[in-house]
Amino acid sequence: MMAKAQDVWTVIRLLQWSTDYLKSKGIDNARLNVERMLCKVLNLDRIHLYLHFDRPLTKSELQAFKALLLRRARNEPLQYILEETEFYSLPIKVGPGVLIPRPETEVLVDRAMNVARSFPPPIRLLDVGTGTGAIAIALAKHLPEARISAIDISDAALKLAHENAQRNDVVSRLELRKLDILSPLPAGWPPQRFHMVVSNPPYVAPEEKDTLAPEIVEFEPHEALFCQQPLQYYERLAGLGPRLLEPEGWLLCEIAPHRTEAVRELFVQHGFHEVEVFPDLAGKARVIQGRMSSKRKGGDNNESEHLS
Ligand code: GLN
């Protein structure tokens, strides 16, 4: 006997039902989320999904889709479910334990590129807390003569960053290293100072936890989001200026908009000049850049023994 029309889960019927379901769970952009998950399960792009509205799903396709739908209904970020996102128009693999690259961080890449072009190549660049490698890879892609180093404390992040570098064909120009920027730096590192240091450090204070969406707090790595003291990473990076940066080298960081003035002051206190702040696409202050004074010499006191 043939199944009745209403028993058959076609693409369109599933789209409609699942969109209502996600909406009832309070998920924003429910329809788009459902389309993207269905595309993944059926291995189709969105155009082809639309061209196959009447296609019935097999039992195993339905099961696979249901598993993804339930994950999304429990607030898991769509990017983790799809295992991929786009950053600076590049495909970036994402996974548990590693922060999902944000669109606002593209502003940091824009600024870094702008500054990089003021140096004669080859420019040396360091990305601190690289995560998926998104920033470093975008820079490597657009600055073909740059030599880029990227560090992170997380093994999961370094593994993913390596995969992303492979996928985007920049593996030979990206050096990844496990390193905690808050700990004393290893002797002899870096072998040469950088022209630019970029970082999107953890900058959410623990007491600001409630301001974050459940997707973020429940699923993204807290070590990439939260800092014990709001300024600790900026203080450390600015303090390491002479150790990490060439004279007149640049430090560029992503910031929380409400900490702009505090971070600016800190940059200035540490002898950075040409300090400027740039907004993200939502108009919020998001990136700060400053140039180290060529008069600053030597490293942090407790690390001067490592200076070459
Ligand atoms: N902008 C991120 C968020 O609030 C935080 C990223 C970070 O701490 N570097 O989702």
Image (cartoon, rainbow, N blue to C red):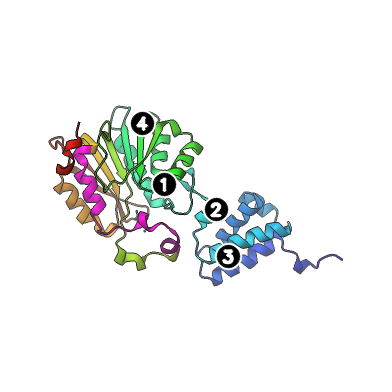
**Dot 1: element:** helix
Q: Where residue 254 sits in the image (x, y, percent)?
A: 31, 50
User: Which range of residues does the magenta coloring cover?
Assistant: 215-243
Snapshot quadrant of residue 217: bottom left
Q: Residue furthest right?
A: 1
**Dot 4: element:** loop
Q: Quadrant of the image for the N terminus?
A: bottom right
Q: Which residue is mark 1?
A: 155
Q: Amino acid at mark 1?
A: Asp
Q: Where residue 244 sits in the image (x, y, percent)?
A: 24, 38
Q: Which residue is mark 2?
A: 82
Q: How many other residues sit within 10 Å of disc 1, few (<14), some (14-19) or many (≥20)?
A: some
Please report whichever mark, 2 or 1, sits nearer to the chain's N-terminal start: 2
**Dot 2: element:** helix
Q: Amino acid at mark 4?
A: Ala
**Dot 3: element:** helix
